[in-house]
Image: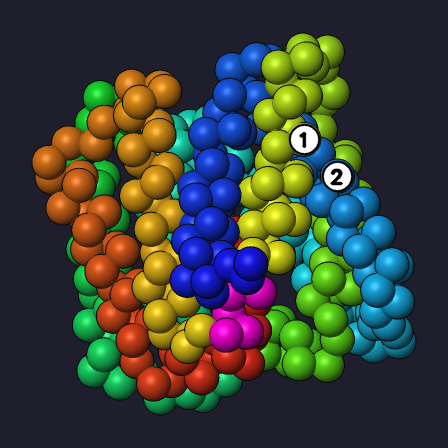
Amino acid sequence: MSVPPAALVLTAAVLWGLLGILGKGAQEAGVGALEVAFWRAALGGVLFALHAGLTRAPLPRGRDLGVTALFGLVGVSVFYGAYQLAVRTGGASLAAVLLYTAPAFVALLGWGLLRERLGAREALAVAGTLGGVALISLGGGGGVTVTGAALGWGLLSGLTYSLYYLYGKAFFGRYAPTALYAVALPVGALGLLPFVTFGTATLAAWGSLVAIAVLSTYLAYLAYSAGLRHLPATRASVIASLEPVVAAVLAALIFGERLSALALAGAALVVGAALLLSVGGRQEKQEKEAAAVSS
């Protein structure tokens, strides 16, 4: 029996929502934030490499290989590292919400680098994102640490996540994304390696690390890309925006993280701004060109 496309995208959102929860669990078990990011890239890279090899997907070569390697350093090393540092400094729910500043960064980067039009919808979404971050910084909450470091790492993760669009626009239509990740993730792991201090991980910590690689990286991408093939990009992005909701609910249940009413209003503004961009015609076109982007 085939799985409905909407269910596949919803599955991806839930799996991505687990990312901060599993990362915080591993960190509380004694694994450093950057080590969590390293193992996500390294183990995920192995899975994508096996997938690309079994499907005989051509790997990028020449200049494309160089650009993909550079993307691995920024879109994997910096993104994965910043996200886990955001989890460590601010909490899983805050990190997940700040990740959703990415669509606003996409609009700004598209305007600044690609000379794309920044219309009223995009300007309103950027303003809503800024306002939402401001409310979050003022609101805080129980078990949530809103500091300059937490906001900085969270916003950096949103910025580097937004680069997936710029890279995907150029390459996801020319190569199988699994082949691109088979190159980018190992490069990203190597980029993180000099900054990682390896400790003695417990069995529970290894369980979290493997789950991050298998569930929140490899399978989440496959589920999202499979659903996107048979679902309008706008609808897929709206369903995927449940990711921070899943993260916030699980963080509250497992770690006692609870955003204040003011911070929740800010979170709603950030996610609402992302949705505002996702229902625009230009953003739908961008998502179709990118084809698949994973957290």
User: Residue, x 82% and y 60% (percent of image)?
Assistant: 52
**Circle 1: element type:** helix
What secondary structure is the magenta-colored segment mainly?
helix
Nearest the viewer among 80 and 239 is 239
Nearest the viewer among 267 and 247 is 247
Point out which mark residue 210 bears.
1
88 left or right of 220 in image: left
* Above or below for 27 versus 173: above
User: Residue, x 23% and y 47% (percent of image)?
Assistant: 267
Residue type at mark 2 is Leu
User: Residue, x 22% and y 21% (percent of image)?
Assistant: 142
In magenta stretch: residue 226: yes
The reply to whether the C-beta atoms of the residues labelled 2 and 1 are less than 8 Å apart is: yes
* Above or below for 102 versus 176: above
Sort mark 2 into few (<14), some (14-19) or many (20+) by Cα contacts within 10 Å: many
- List x then y, in percent, for residue 163: 54, 65
104 left or right of 224 in image: left
User: Residue, x 51% and y 59% (percent of image)?
Assistant: 3
Q: Quick one: which residue is furthest to the left in this view?
A: 261
Q: Quadrant of the N terminus?
A: bottom right
What residue does disc 2 label?
Answer: 43
- List x then y, in percent, for residue 167: 62, 71
Sort mark 1 into few (<14), some (14-19) or many (20+) by Cα contacts within 10 Å: some
Nearest the viewer among 190 and 54 is 54
Point out which mark residue 76 bears.
none
